[in-house]
Image: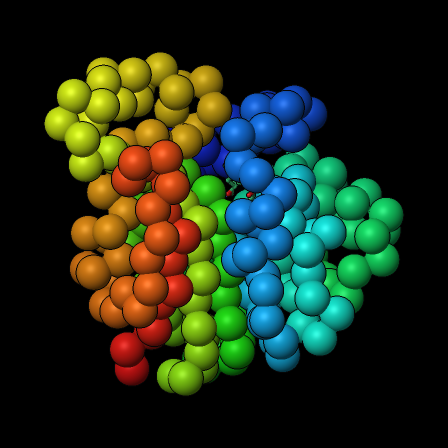
Amino acid sequence: MNRTEIIRKRYNRVASVYDWMDIIIRDKWRKAIYEGLNGDVLEVGVGTGRNIPFYPPEAHVTGIDFSENMLAKAKIRLKEFNANAQLLLMDAQEMDFPDNHFDAVVTTCVFCSVPDPIKGLSEIRRVVKPNGEIRMLEHMRSNQPMMGKMMDVINPLVVGIVGANINRDTMNNLQQAGFIVKDEYQIMGSMYRMLKLSPNK
Ligand SMILES: C[S@@+](CC[C@H](N)C(=O)[O-])C[C@H]1O[C@@H](n2cnc3c(N)ncnc32)[C@H](O)[C@@H]1O
């Protein structure tokens, strides 16, 4: 089984309890990440649809995820909130969208688990318009040396159970994929970051 299949299976396995696992992510952060967005917006790794209540009515959101079970939960939430959105089963590493298609792209806590993060990030860069905006709320390896080391030690356990890496160097991955960081807000030390990025193309 390849890495993508392994991680997809892990998310299928945790889908029924996922909403209990991510209580650390505050609604006010989810709301902030969507604030002011309009037009065609892509949400990568939509999961169980925790951001759906915060979709602005001015935006048409396309949410993708590669886990059928996570997406099934999101579909229930979509009906509940009657949001202006569509949900598609799709791998972020190989998207079915044309180049320069979306006005904005959003991810929340996704690039800890995309098996090949540079590939997924490069796909985002391909599908967003040159003047489009990318917003991310991502957790990553702490800059604090002791905490960073601890995250390295615990990481294999977390990946094994949930499928998420807690020690990814996402800032470096973003740079490698060609993005420019326009705005950065750190939460809980440097463990969570809210980012505004330009595709730089
Ligand atoms: C930690 S969850 C976060 C879910 C949601 N964004 C949230 O904030 O609650 C990560 C999500 O990313 C999805 N994911 C990981 N790799 C993916 C990929 N290559 N393509 C599509 N979805 C992916 C997982 O299936 C899972 O639903």
Count of marks overlaid on the render = 0
Is residue 166 shown to the viewer in this render? yes
The residue that appears at 26% across and 69% down in the rendered structure is 180
Looking at the rendered image, the quarter that the N terminus falls into is: top left
Residue 94 x, y percent position in the rendering: 44, 59
The residue that appears at 81% across and 43% down in the rendered structure is 76
Tell me which corner region of the image, top left, top right, bottom left or bottom right, holds residue 83: bottom right
Give the vertical position of 36 relative to 31 (above or below): below
Residue 64 x, y percent position in the rendering: 59, 55
**Camera-nearest residue between 3 and 22:** 22
Residue 10 x, y percent position in the rendering: 51, 27
The residue that appears at 38% across and 24% down in the rendered structure is 159
Looking at the rendered image, the quarter that the C terminus falls into is: bottom left
Horizontal arrangement in the rendering, residue 143 relative to residue 64 (left or right): left
Give the vertical position of 141 relative to 136 (above or below): above
The residue that appears at 67% across and 72% down in the rendered structure is 59
Horizontal arrangement in the rendering, residue 144 relative to residue 20 (left or right): left
Horizontal arrangement in the rendering, residue 51 relative to residue 170 (left or right): right
Q: State how the image is colored.
A: rainbow
Is residue 119 shown to the viewer in this render? no
**Camera-nearest residue between 4 and 33:** 33
Give the vertical position of 128 relative to 139 (above or below): below
